[in-house]
Amino acid sequence: MATLVSHPDEARVISKRFGQGATDIERYLQLDGYKAVQKALAMQPDDIINEVKNSGLRGRGGAGFSTGMKWSFVPKQSAKPKYVLCNGDESEPGTCKDRLIFEHDPHGVIEGAMIAALAVGSHTAYIYIRGEYRYLSVIMQKAIKDAYAKGFLGKNIFGSGYDLDVYWHGGAGAYEVGEESALMESLEGKRGIPRIRPPFPAVVGLWGGPTVINNAETLAAVPHIILGGADWYAKLGTPKNGGTRMFCLAGHLNKPGVYELPMGYNLKKMIYEVGGGIPNGRSLKAVVPGGSSTPILLPEEIDIPMDFDSVAKAGSMLGSGGVVVLDDTTCIVKFALRTIKFYQHESCGWCIPCREGTDWLKKTLTRFHAGAGVTKDIDNIYYLAENMLGKTFCPLGDAAAMPTMAFVKKFRKEFEDHLDGKPCPFEKTGTAVPVMA
Amino acid sequence: MKFSDEFEARFTEMLTHYPTRRSALVPTLLYAQDEVGNLSDEVIAELAQRLDLTELEVRNVISYYSMLTTKPRGKYNVQVCTNIACMLRGGEELLGHCKKKLGIGHKGTTPDGLFSLEEVECIGACSWAPAAQVNYDFHENLTSAKMDQILDEYKKKGTQ
């Protein structure tokens, strides 16, 4: 449904089967489908883990933790059943990549989840898809059914003697459920309130059993790593940042879209060449490099490789791959307000710093943007955010705090321009006519 | 209470997916809402009984998830995203346009029960912004004119 785009610099691994009809299991099989899981069935679990470790694959949900390492934390012996949980609750503003993966390559996610299950000795995997993506749940349910019909899932898969069930699960609208412990709560039929850690899910997860939780894009990469080899995959990216990344280019760009580029692709090039630059003859004001929770970057900060370590070095995060571009007509105060409005809406209220912090920030920024701000507000906004950082059970508090601090730090002058009852100098933010018809 | 055969088949199957009955709750609530229109007292009582939960436990879960509602909505729920990526490309203007066209505000329903309107958070259409969902259907790269056309089509469909 969503429009596909392409660019010569793309390195298509995960998106290799996009637009090829691979939702159909026969077509998927023609396109090397279910070969990787058969290869994995002949491997020792530790060899699968090592292969994934050596590939440099890091969590595509945003945290960028080594996938192989995560798998290795699952205890070999467990009295309780072990589980694999695919996180397809994609809801970080700016991010729309998992949607395309589910839409075009659902079997790729199933196969990735199967390999993860083999690696950690689990016999049950769940694929959690956000409630808004109903059409993708339908696609996934059919894909799973077809895989069962072929004998790829269920008892004795591929005649190996290994039993493996894969199930889909649907959400009902909640950003916070994308956080791993809240995701498990939701799957267990509860409110998505985060759990305190330790114990980590790898030891005590779903229904108390050891659980591996991976983002859909992460799992979709796994079959390609098993077939192509860790070295091949690692070399696609930069040191310690293996492979490719689905970058969702959004905002003020001539050619927005989801592009699969090598990890470490230059951000400036991504904006001006892949994304086609800024429309309407405007100039670049700032970039949110990895979804709304990542600190904003100024034009002079974007000549960087887009991998986890380089973006962290630049003071932000690679995050979930949502690159949101702002042109010079954008009001940062308004942008900050909209960002905080989101986090205030999504805060579950479990941790007081997040519940109160996001609410006060929203109130302050609303008043501030409306022209009733006082000088002291600017430091207060920063102070409120700073006092949420690292003080909550789940990273939602951090996700609200980090960008807010960056907005104040990097655009203090613009906040000051809103003082003394002056009208917003950027009256037109967000009312720009869409550049694509 | 009576749900469709499809609902019952899915529900029965889902219960076999998990070690606890409660685990089927969230997706089941959404499917029940799709059939009934909202999570009425009757639906809540029925699902609580089926999943060995108290009605209060079910209500607690409902209040957490933004897609779930105990109040009836219009036949077509128009959900306009105004989050950052959509905002930059006219999402707020689009929402304003819908408010005017439908004559209702955020979470309002038209008197004929055909449409309701909601300002929603990111729906995962950032690269095709601004975007909206009508029930589960995505509509992307929208303009006010395009939105008019879409709403007119739903209106035609809904009054046939």
Image (spheres, rainbow, N blue to C red):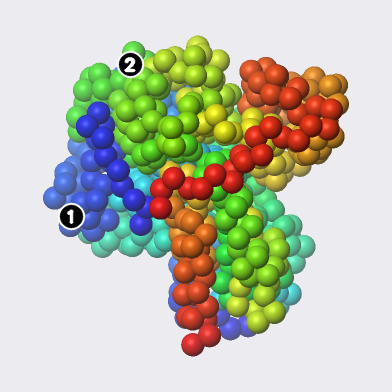
In x, y percent, where is residue B33?
Answer: 60, 70
Depth check: give the residue in front, A248 or A327. Answer: A327
The residue depicted at 70 percent of the width and 19 percent of the height is A413
Residue at 38%, 38% (x, y): give it. A254
Number of marks in picture: 2
Q: Position of residue A90 (x, y in %)?
A: 50, 44
Measured along the vertical axis of the image, is residue A240 above or below residue B102?
A: above
Horizontal and vertical percent for residue A160? 22, 46
| Residue bearing mark 1 | A27
Left-right relation of A313 to A162: right
Looking at the image, is mark 2 or mark 1 earlier in the sequence? 1
Q: Amino acid at mark 2?
A: Thr
Look at label 1 and name its amino acid.
Arg
**Residue B100: which quarter of the image?**
bottom right
**Other-residue count near label 2 (Cα within 10 Å), few / some / many at <14 / 14–19 / ≥20:** many
Q: Say whether marks 2 and 1 touch (CB < 8 Å).
A: no
Whole-percent x and y of residue A325? 49, 32
Name the residue beneath numbered marker 2: A238
How far apart marks 2 and 1 lie (CA) works out to 32 Å
